[in-house]
């Protein structure tokens, strides 16, 4: 087993621990829009227009050239541990509460 896997995703250097021999990466740019994906074993990292997601969970926006580490599930950006952002909860909080239908 590899100790770590590394790749560059746009201006970001990415390190995944533990590493895995099974890796793949893609990048798509269209105008000012860019999407990068890196899969390392069970870890899937995506950067879409500087928004970071790991395994389908959002970890917020990135500044150019920030280093990203995913170490046994812990996501670190530029030396700071990040927690996933609950996007669904933010959307729910903005909606006015609706009364629940009563069951007959």
Image (cartoon, grey):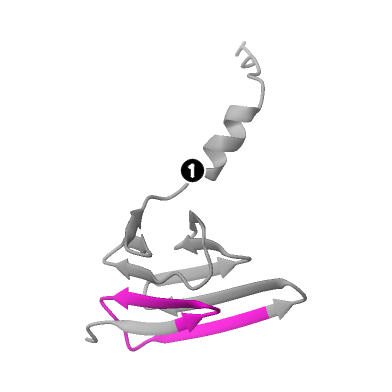
Give me the residue at 43% from left, 84% from top: 7
Foreground: 15 or 104?
Answer: 15
Give me the residue at 34% from left, 68% from top: 70
> What secondary structure is the magenta-colored segment mainly?
strand
Q: Quadrant of the N terminus?
A: bottom left
Res 47 → quadrant = bottom right
Examine the structure image and report whether residue 20 is included in the region drawn in magenta. Answer: yes
- Crowdedness of circle 1 by 10 Å Cα count: few (<14), some, many (20+)? few
What residue sits right under mark 1 in the picture? 86
Q: Position of residue 30 (x, y in %)?
A: 75, 77
Res 91 → quadrant = top right
Position of residue 69 relative to residue 13, above or below, is above
Q: Position of residue 27 (x, y in %)?
A: 61, 81
The kind of secondary structure element at disc 1 is loop
Res 43 → quadrant = bottom left
Q: Quadrant of the C terminus?
A: top right
Give me the residue at 64% from left, 14% from top: 99
Q: Which residues are magenta?
A: 8-28
């Amino acid at each position: 087993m590899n100790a770590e896997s590394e790749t560059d995703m746009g201006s970001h250097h990415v390190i995944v621990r533990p590493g895995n021999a099974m890796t793949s990466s893609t990048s798509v740019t269209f105008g000012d829009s860019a999407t990068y994906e890196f899969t390392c074993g069970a870890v899937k990292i995506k950067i879409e227009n500087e928004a970071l997601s790991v395994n389908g969970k959002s970890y917020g926006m990135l500044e150019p050239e920030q280093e990203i580490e995913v170490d046994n599930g812990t996501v670190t950006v530029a030396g700071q541990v990040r927690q996933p952002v609950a996007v669904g909860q933010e959307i729910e909080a903005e909606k006015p509460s609706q009364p629940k239908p009563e069951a007959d």
